[in-house]
């Protein structure tokens, strides 16, 4: 314990010395996130400096091995770092699908060359990744995907279409599920990595009900992919895909924890109204806060269970379901608390309709990454072992 | 939030003990069908003592195990799972926390350790829990006090050797200041006990105090400072009741999930129907969340953290809601057999109702979460 307390003191001192003051201000919006990548435009020098100092210490990915650009911290040390960053209000230095999704899958399934190359790039924020999973005909039934990768000797030739590819228009590389065999549904899928600047790749943003375009359609027309960019074995990509989905669900479940803005215990934004002026609204917010704080405890327990290897493999599905349903409820309450103020769509007063747009965007949370219904089905089958599930 | 080796060992001891010795058939149904005046068996309470459970929170220096809310919570989850009737929550958890550090502790801890003493808490005066509203009057007289007023929902008050009574020595109902906690012994002159059986066949007394005269040394803690020991008892009681409610939810849902795998209708196991699968999966997740909330509250209490009071309310509210969902889904998914006295699932529904109300309902605690959060 004494060793850990020393680590805590050192960490706090280092963060105080190295985290620029501007990076300790609460984030104003998602635009303050640092995604990294070839074309990323830093919001400020402080943002770049914060990424650089954290990356050079391996603390963008504190619990990854040092050999791959990580910090080599134990689970207990990584938790302390997270707590100390929260205590000082440090912003995350880097947010990326490379960290939250691809990295864990590469650590488990990648070969040594792939780990050295790709994990190090992710840790430094050099390459921004997107996820090529869903297709027009393969949503909840993901394994029904049809994008084809033909073996051409020294490379794969990829043809097909993906949809709901998050930030594909801003990403440098894609991790992509492709069909390498039509003989078996789950056993004919492979996991490929390739550059979005490869000839034959094109993207088209999708306009959502929120007015935002965080997703794209992505098209592949005779894209050549070198064979050493296959992760794991050919036709065994579904294992990698499922493992990665577990990490995606963990990430999405965190949205139920709120963004730390607002006045309620769990971060329900009461907007300009410091106290809810309607008794029934107050009661709904209070009931929500109970659920949200209980879920925060569950999230902490879940992370500890994962690190101790005690989490059921299907537990991320439960967390994803609960977290996203909670986030939808939070946004419903924000709209209720805001009344007619919250309905404005473009005014400066409403920060360009932030409440309404976030509320509409949140409806996708229980669809993306596997719908709530898919998650409940997974829990029924793998945890409760109900018949025929 | 992973259990330590020692906590696991405790769980491994208590789980089979409660499943065997504290089972529904041999305890709850047995004493209910006998019309037992206490609603629990003193023999089992003795066994609790032999295992060191009655003194789980009593400091080692006073002969106890000196453990905390996490450990007593593990015991309570097993009690809830088996609907085991016992004075554990009131005596070994809430009353011990109220008494700790006071002169009265010396008087009562040995009997609690031995499994011979039952201690109850008299707080509520109306049908809803609201401890700051205590009005029962304690007037100074000579070197002591005279109590006048009434209490209700005094769990095991009819069996108790000592009742810890929250009374008002100053201020007015609604003030947390000016309250004093008294230890009133069984058979005190002027104390009338109406021992009522509740829906779950546990017993809770209505007490009326008519000029009950007490010596000054009956005071637990400080005169006018009763809110402190009372808060300790309430926080421990709330977190503990939350753990017991998680156990009730787990017991009811395990029984229900098992039934879904056995009962056939329309030529299928009913667990094959997606309408039930999704409800079962939702319930499973809610119970996990409630368990985490109860554990968090217990850990914060043990750490003396400033957030402990907030989380005790979160845990009590969440566990109450989730347990209610578990027993309602339980009876519904069992269908007709769930409505019979012969089947155990209905017993979970009755226990949930009593535990949810004890130390404040989910509504009371949601309101507290709002107040503690400043809205």
Image (spheres, helix red, strand yellow):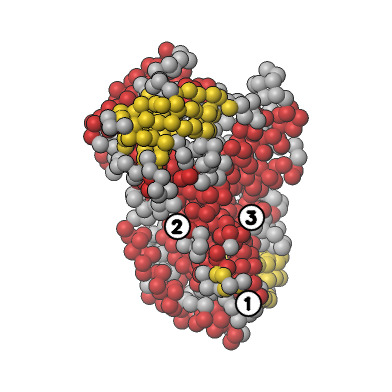
The residue beneath circle 1 is B337
Q: Is any atom of residue A248 visible in this view?
A: yes
The residue lying at 34 percent from left, 49 percent from top is A308
Tell me the subunit letter for badge 3.
B
Instruction: Name the N-terminal-most of marks 1 and 3.
Output: 1
Is A76 rendered above or below residue A379? above
Is B230 rendered above or below residue A14? below
**Tags 1 and 2 on a common chain:** no
Query: What crowding class fits label 2: few (fewer than 14 Cα within 10 Å), some (14-19), or many (20 or more)?
Result: some
Image quadrant where one finds the N terminus of chain A: top left
- Residue B155's tag is none
Query: Which quarter of the picture shows residue A175?
Result: top left
**B48 or B30, which lies in front?**
B30
**Tags 2 and 3 on a common chain:** no
The residue beneath circle 3 is B362
The residue beneath circle 2 is A382
Give the CA separation, mark 2 to mark 3: 31 Å
């Amino acid at each position: 314990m004494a060793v850990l307390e020393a680590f805590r003191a050192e960490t706090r001192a280092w963060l105080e010395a190295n985290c620029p003051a501007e990076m300790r201000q609460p984030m104003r919006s998602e635009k303050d996130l640092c995604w990294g990548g070839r074309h990323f435009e830093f919001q400020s020098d402080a943002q770049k400096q914060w990424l650089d100092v954290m990356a050079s210490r391996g603390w963008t990915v504190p619990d990854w091995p040092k050999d791959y650009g990580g910090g080599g911290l134990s689970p207990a040390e990584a938790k302390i770092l997270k707590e100390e960053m929260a205590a000082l209000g440090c912003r995350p230095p880097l947010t990326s699908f490379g960290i939250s999704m691809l990295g864990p899958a590469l650590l488990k399934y990648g070969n040594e060359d792939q780990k050295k190359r790709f994990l190090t790039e992710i840790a430094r924020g050099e390459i921004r990744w997107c996820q090529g999973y869903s297709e027009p005909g393969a949503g909840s039934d993901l394994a029904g995907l049809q994008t084809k990768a033909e073996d051409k000797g020294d490379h794969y030739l990829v043809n097909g279409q993906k949809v709901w590819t998050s930030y594909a228009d801003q990403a440098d590389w894609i991790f992509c599920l492709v069909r390498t065999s039509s003989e078996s549904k789950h056993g004919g899928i492979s996991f490929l990595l390739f550059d979005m600047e490869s000839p034959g790749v094109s993207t088209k943003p999708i306009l959502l009900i929120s007015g935002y375009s965080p997703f794209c359609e992505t098209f592949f027309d005779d894209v050549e992919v070198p064979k050493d960019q296959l992760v794991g074995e050919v036709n065994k990509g579904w294992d990698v895909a499922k493992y990665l989905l577990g990490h995606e669900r963990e990430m999405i479940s965190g949205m139920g924890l709120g963004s730390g803005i607002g006045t309620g215990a769990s971060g329900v934004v009461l907007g300009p109204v410091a106290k809810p002026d309607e008794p029934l609204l107050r009661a709904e917010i209070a009931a929500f806060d109970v659920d949200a704080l209980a879920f925060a405890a569950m999230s902490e327990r879940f992370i500890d269970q994962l690190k101790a290897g005690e989490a059921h493999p299907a537990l991320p599905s439960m967390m994803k379901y609960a977290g996203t349903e909670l986030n939808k409820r939070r946004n419903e309450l924000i709209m209720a608390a805001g009344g007619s103020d919250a309905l404005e769509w473009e005014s400066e007063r409403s920060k360009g309709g932030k409440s309404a747009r976030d509320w509409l965007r949140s409806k996708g949370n229980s669809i993306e990454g596997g719908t709530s219904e898919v998650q409940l089905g997974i829990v029924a089958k793998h945890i409760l072992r109900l018949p025929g599930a | 939030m992973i259990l330590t080796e020692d906590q696991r060992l405790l769980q491994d001891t208590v789980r089979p003990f409660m499943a065997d010795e504290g089972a529904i058939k041999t305890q709850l149904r047995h004493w209910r069908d006998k019309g037992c005046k206490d609603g629990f068996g003193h023999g089992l309470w003795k066994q609790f003592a032999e295992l060191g459970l009655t003194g789980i929170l009593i400091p080692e220096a006073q002969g106890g195990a000196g453990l905390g809310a996490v450990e007593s919570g593990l015991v309570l989850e097993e009690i809830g799972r088996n609907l085991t009737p016992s004075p554990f929550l009131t005596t070994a958890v809430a009353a011990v926390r109220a008494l700790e550090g006071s002169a009265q502790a010396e008087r009562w801890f040995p009997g609690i350790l031995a499994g011979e003493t039952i201690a109850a808490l008299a707080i509520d005066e109306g049908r809803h829990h609201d401890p700051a509203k205590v009005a029962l009057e304690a007037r100074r007289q000579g070197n002591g006090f005279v109590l006048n007023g009434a209490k209700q929902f005094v769990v095991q008050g009819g069996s108790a050797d000592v009742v810890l009574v929250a009374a008002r020595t100053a201020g007015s109902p609604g003030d947390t200041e000016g309250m004093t906690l008294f230890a009133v012994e069984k058979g005190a002159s002027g104390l009338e006990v109406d021992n009522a059986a509740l829906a779950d066949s546990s017993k809770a007394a209505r007490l009326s105090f008519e000029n009950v005269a007490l010596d000054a040394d009956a005071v637990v803690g400080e005169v006018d400072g009763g809110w402190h020991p009372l808060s300790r008892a309430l926080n421990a009681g709330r977190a503990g009741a939350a753990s017991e409610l998680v156990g009730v939810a787990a017991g009811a849902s395990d029984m229900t999930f098992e039934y879904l795998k056995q009962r056939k209708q329309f030529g299928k196991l009913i667990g094959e129907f997606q309408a039930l699968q999704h409800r079962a999966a939702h319930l499973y997740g809610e119970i996990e969340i409630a368990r985490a909330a109860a554990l968090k509250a217990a850990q914060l209490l043990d750490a003396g953290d400033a957030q402990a009071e907030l989380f005790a309310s979160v845990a009590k509210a969440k566990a109450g809601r989730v347990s209610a969902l578990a027993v309602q889904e339980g009876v519904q998914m069992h269908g007709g057999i769930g409505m019979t006295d012969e089947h155990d699932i209905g017993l979970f529904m009755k226990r949930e109702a009593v535990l949810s109300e004890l130390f404040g309902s989910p509504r009371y605690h949601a309101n507290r979460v709002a107040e503690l959060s400043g809205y």
